[in-house]
Image (spheres, grey):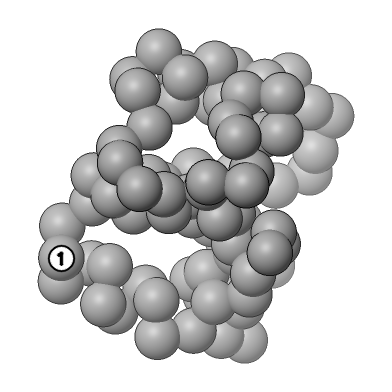
Amino acid sequence: MGKRLDLRKYKVFFFGSRVSGRGAKTSDIDVGIRGPKEVPLDKMAEIREDIEKLPLLYKIDVVDFSAADKVFQKVAASQLELLTK
């Protein structure tokens, strides 16, 4: 993601069932992005495209928290693991 976003401005983190320990073997991996403003749609598309090309065993779901519903943000942010500082 670092080639698509300025990681000095945007934080990237894991959240969801895998972080909370409630994930099943088939659960996806949830990755959140939070920054000073919404990630432009073309950048989000590029990030998702880059991830889809990776040879992974699990689906990765990327969420721009700046564009997400406030209730979703609150619930999802209750347990997260920061990837960038």
Which part of the image, by quadrant, shows the N terminus? top right
Write down the quadrant of residue 27 in the picture.
Answer: bottom right
Q: Residue at x 52, y 69 (%)?
A: 15
Q: Quadrant of residue 19?
A: bottom right
Q: What residue is pinned by disc 1?
A: 70
Q: Give the crowd class for mark 1: few <14, some 14-19, many >=20 residues within 10 Å.
A: few
Q: Is residue 78 left or right of residue 1?
A: left
Instruction: Locate the C terminus and report the quarter of the image it occupies.
Output: bottom right
Q: Could you tell me residue 84's position as x and y percent?
A: 69, 59
Residue 77 showing in the rendered view = yes
Q: Amino acid at mark 1?
A: Lys
The residue under the point 56% across, 55% down is 11
Q: Is residue 10 above or below residue 77?
A: above
Residue 41, image x, y percentages = 33, 20
19 relative position to 65: left or right: right
Q: Which residue sits at x=15%, y=71%? A: 71
Front residue of this view, candidates 41 and 15: 41
- Residue 3 in picture, x, y percent from top left: 71, 24
Residue 60 screen position, x and y as percent: 60, 44
Q: In which quadrant of the rendered view does residue 37 lie?
A: top left
- Decide if residue 62 is on the left or right side of residue 19: left
Disc 1 secondary structure class: helix
Q: Residue at x 15, y 57 (%)?
A: 69
Q: In this view, which residue lies farthest toward the right?
A: 55
